[in-house]
Amino acid sequence: MTALGKIIFIADYIEPSREEIDGLPEIRKISYDDLDKTVYLILDNTLNYLNEVCKRRIDPMSQKAFEYYKNLNYHYNIKESVNEYSKSND
C-alpha cells in the first residue's frame, strides 16, 4: 500500500464521526507517528471484530494484508506499545 493509500485507509477508520471502537483513541494518536503500525492495528481490530462478533469469513486478501503488516511490525509487541503510548500521551 502506498503512503497515500495508508493515509486514506486510516482516515476512513479514525474519522471524527465514527462510533467509538475499542482502542480508537490510541489508534488516532499512533496514526500521527507510524502509518504501518496504525494499519496493522486497524486490520487487527477489524478482523477480530469480524471473527468474534459477526462470525464472518475473512477475505483472503484482508488476511494477507494483516499478515504483511504483522510481519512488518514483528519486533514490536503491538498491543503493549499501544498501552504504553496512550499512557505517555495522557
Image (cartoon, rainbow, N blue to C red):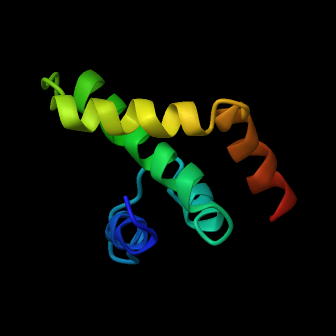
* As drawn, 23 above or below 6: above
In front here: 47 or 70? Answer: 70
Residue 35, x across and y down, in percent: 55, 61
Q: Residue at x 29, y 30 (%)?
A: 63
Q: Residue reaching furthest front?
A: 2
* As drawn, 18 above or below 17: above
In front here: 35 or 1? Answer: 1
In front here: 7 or 24? Answer: 7
Number of numbered markers: 0
Q: Is residue 87 left or right of residue 54?
A: right
Q: Residue reaching furthest right?
A: 88
Q: Which residue is drawn at 44% across and 36% down?
A: 68
Residue 81, x across and y down, in percent: 74, 42
Q: Which residue is drawn at 36% across and 63% down?
A: 13
In front here: 39 or 64? Answer: 64
Q: Quadrant of the C terminus?
A: bottom right
* As drawn, 20 above or below 61: below
Q: Which residue is drawn at 33% across and 76% down?
A: 17
Res. 76 image quadrant: top right
Residue 72, x across and y down, in percent: 57, 39
Whether residue 44 is visible? yes
Whether residue 22 is visible? no
Q: Quadrant of the N terminus?
A: bottom left
Residue 29, x across and y down, in percent: 64, 66
* As drawn, 39 above or below 61: below
